[in-house]
Image (cartoon, rainbow, N blue to C red):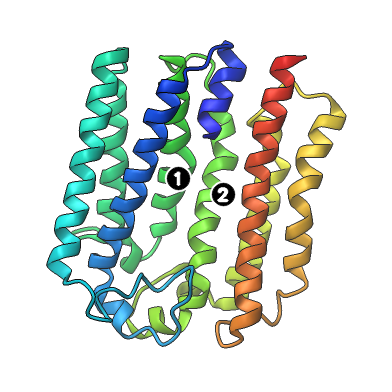
């Protein structure tokens, strides 16, 4: 949605039909990610002693509700549907880069969860989520509405990348015991829980502080607003920095929710600023 708002702010036109198409792509993409990751992570999820609403998989395989093969087929179906929707939008609206971007995003997931790269296990899978969520998705939204890459704030994708990177780091924090048991080299396993939390807050602060790259041309008070609004949850999360280990589930989840809330508030602030700037 951020990319679509930025496209409207830059070009002054908006298509509700394209909005619906892009949101449908987003739903299919989310289902593809959930199904594919549940299949790929089934062994690690089986030894995870502390699954949460945010992490640890859906548990449908572990609870015997679905077979791994059913999830594998469902993931392929979602990917096929996503490509078909992208091809349809490309044919109707001459958006020929759209299928390329969609397939590229799917390739990032493959590199994240599946052999031969499987970076979520080997380490540095956060980079792929940062690219997928923070770069590819905003580009898809922008390109779909604008019909080109003209006026896309390329430097503004850097804070978006950081938010996607931190999102991966945050949701892996409650899974630390299971990931360590499964030799899954997440950020917290590689660096330790405390440093992972500290780095998450530092990267959030940097992303928020450079939000003016996403929406340029703001007056000083506009820049101050897009920084101040999402910074509140970061400061609140900082109070839990020393105690939010995975073993302290309540505080760990509060830390994750506050961090994720800060990231979402940052994106909402950027979208609001872009819309207001385009109207005045």
Q: Quadrant of residue 140?
A: top left
The answer to whether residue 153 is visible is no
Residue at 17% from the left image edge and 50% from the top image edge: 76
Compared to 121, does 34 lie above or below? above
Residue at the location (68% across, 54% down)? 262
Residue at image mark 2: 163
Residue 97's spot in the image, x, y percent?
30, 22
Q: Secondary structure at mark 1?
A: helix
Q: Is residue 173 above or below residue 126?
A: below
Relative image position of residue 212 (x, y in whole percent): 71, 32
Residue with the mark numbered 1:
133
* The one of 195 and 112 positioned closer to us in this rendering: 112
**Near-viewer residue (116 or 70):** 70
Q: Which residue appears at 41% of the width and 14% of the height?
A: 147
Mark 2 packing: few (<14 Cα in 10 Å), some, or many (20+)? many
Vertical position of residue 27 compared to residue 57: above or below = above
Task: Please name the residue shown 78% across and 62% down the image.
Answer: 235
Q: Given contact means CB atoms under 8 Å apart, are the residues at marks 1 and 2 in contact?
A: yes
Label 2: state its secondary structure: helix
């Amino acid at each position: 949605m951020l990319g679509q708002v930025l496209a409207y702010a830059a070009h002054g036109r908006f298509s509700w039909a394209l909005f619906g198409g892009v949101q449908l792509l987003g739903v299919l993409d989310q289902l593809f990610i959930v199904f594919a990751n549940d299949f790929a992570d089934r062994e690690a999820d089986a030894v995870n002693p502390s699954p949460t609403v945010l992490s640890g998989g859906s548990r449908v395989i572990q609870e015997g509700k679905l077979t791994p093969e059913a999830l594998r087929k469902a993931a392929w179906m979602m990917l096929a549907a996503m490509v078909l929707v992208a091809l349809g939008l490309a044919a109707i609206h001459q958006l020929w880069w759209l299928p390329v971007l969609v397939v590229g995003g799917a390739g990032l997931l493959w590199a994240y969860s599946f052999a031969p790269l499987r970076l979520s296990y080997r380490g540095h899978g956060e980079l792929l989520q940062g690219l997928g969520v923070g770069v590819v998705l905003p580009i898809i939204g922008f390109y779909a509405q604008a019909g080109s890459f003209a006026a896309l704030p390329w430097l503004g994708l850097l804070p978006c990348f950081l938010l996607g990177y931190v999102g991966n780091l945050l949701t892996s924090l409650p899974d630390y015991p299971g990931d360590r048991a499964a030799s899954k080299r997440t950020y917290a396993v590689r660096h330790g829980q405390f440093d992972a939390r500290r780095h998450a807050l530092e990267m959030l602060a940097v992303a928020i502080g450079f939000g003016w790259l996403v929406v340029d041309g703001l007056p000083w008070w506009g820049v101050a607003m897009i920084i101040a609004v999402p910074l509140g949850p970061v400061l609140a999360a900082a109070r839990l920095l020393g105690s939010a280990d995975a073993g302290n589930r309540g505080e760990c989840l509060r830390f994750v929710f506050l961090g994720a809330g800060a990231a979402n508030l940052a994106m909402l602030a950027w979208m609001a600023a872009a819309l207001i700037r385009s109207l005045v």
